[in-house]
Amino acid sequence: MTTFFDDFIIDSIDDLKMLIDELGFVPFFENEIEGFSIEEHMAPGHWYNDSTDGFWDAWEWKGPVIRETKCAYGKFLRGKAMYISSKWFPDFANYRRDGYDFDARYEDGLASFGDKELYVLLDANAPILSKPLKKLGNYGTKGKKGFDSSITRLQKQCYVIISDFRYATDKSGNEYGWGIAEYSTPEKFMGKRFINNVYKRTPEESYERLVRHFKKILPGIEDKWIEKMLK
């Protein structure tokens, strides 16, 4: 299968931002659709296992890309991370949410009490880093269990997104280590552009728009692969 960006090489943060704007959906890691990921299109030296200068650009670009484009980032693709542009995320979220806001989902018995606890806590404190969020909710070895499964499920359902990545700093103010995820809700991070459009259509209408778009950016893709990506 050919993809919309078969020969495209990501050599800068601007290349990545342009790709997100053009495609709308950009998976971070290699997946079942060959060629449809950042990992497969990064220029040499920009991916962690081939970098010789200690800078892993694909990871370090995450925070700036999210902040500057206001795109959604999270575990949207079968448990793997994906960027989704602000233009396409309302339809994607509408379909994944099946037209429900979180309160309605919970009232209809479609969300667990544990997920509701975490969602309410996160929504009240967003944006918030994972560590203080866990502390506020008393998640940990001696506290409540299930943080990782709940936060992943809330991302899959598009009630929660990763709004930034922050780094720990040493005494001199130098950043180090892996970026720490900062969580928010699409409503708070994207604002009116999301709020005014997420339930603008029926979930079925959003699904049809998404299918047409995927067939455009992934020519020749079979319907079964689109269904897998979207469900």
Image: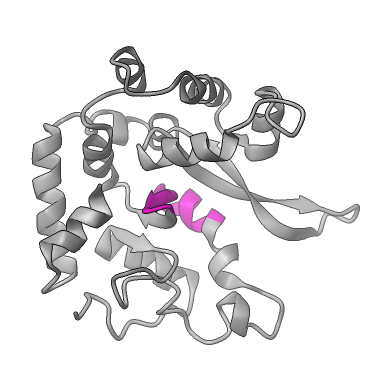
Q: Quadrant of residue 176?
A: bottom right
Q: Quadrant of residue 229?
A: bottom left
Q: Judge whether 3 appears above or below 127 on screen.
A: below
**Percent from the top left, x then y, of residue 120?**
50, 19
- Depth check: give the residue in front, 67 or 50: 50
- Depth check: give the residue in front, 180 or 223: 223
Is residue 102 found left or right of 180 in the rendered image?
A: left
Is residue 177 found left or right of 148 in the rendered image?
A: right
- Depth check: give the residue in front, 212 or 70: 212
Q: Judge whether 128 appears above or below 48 on screen.
A: above
Is residue 37 found left or right of 42 in the rendered image?
A: left
> Residue, x 47% and y 52% (percent of image)?
66
**Percent from the top left, x then y, of residue 185?**
44, 32
Question: In the displayed image of the protein, which residue is found farthest to the top?
Answer: 107
Magenta residues span: 63-79
**Percent from the top left, x then y, of residue 52?**
68, 86
> Residue, x 76% and y 58% (percent of image)?
175
Q: Judge whether 65 appears above or below 156 on screen.
A: below
Question: In the displayed image of the protein, which residue is found farthest to the right?
Answer: 171
**Percent from the top left, x then y, of residue 197?**
22, 33
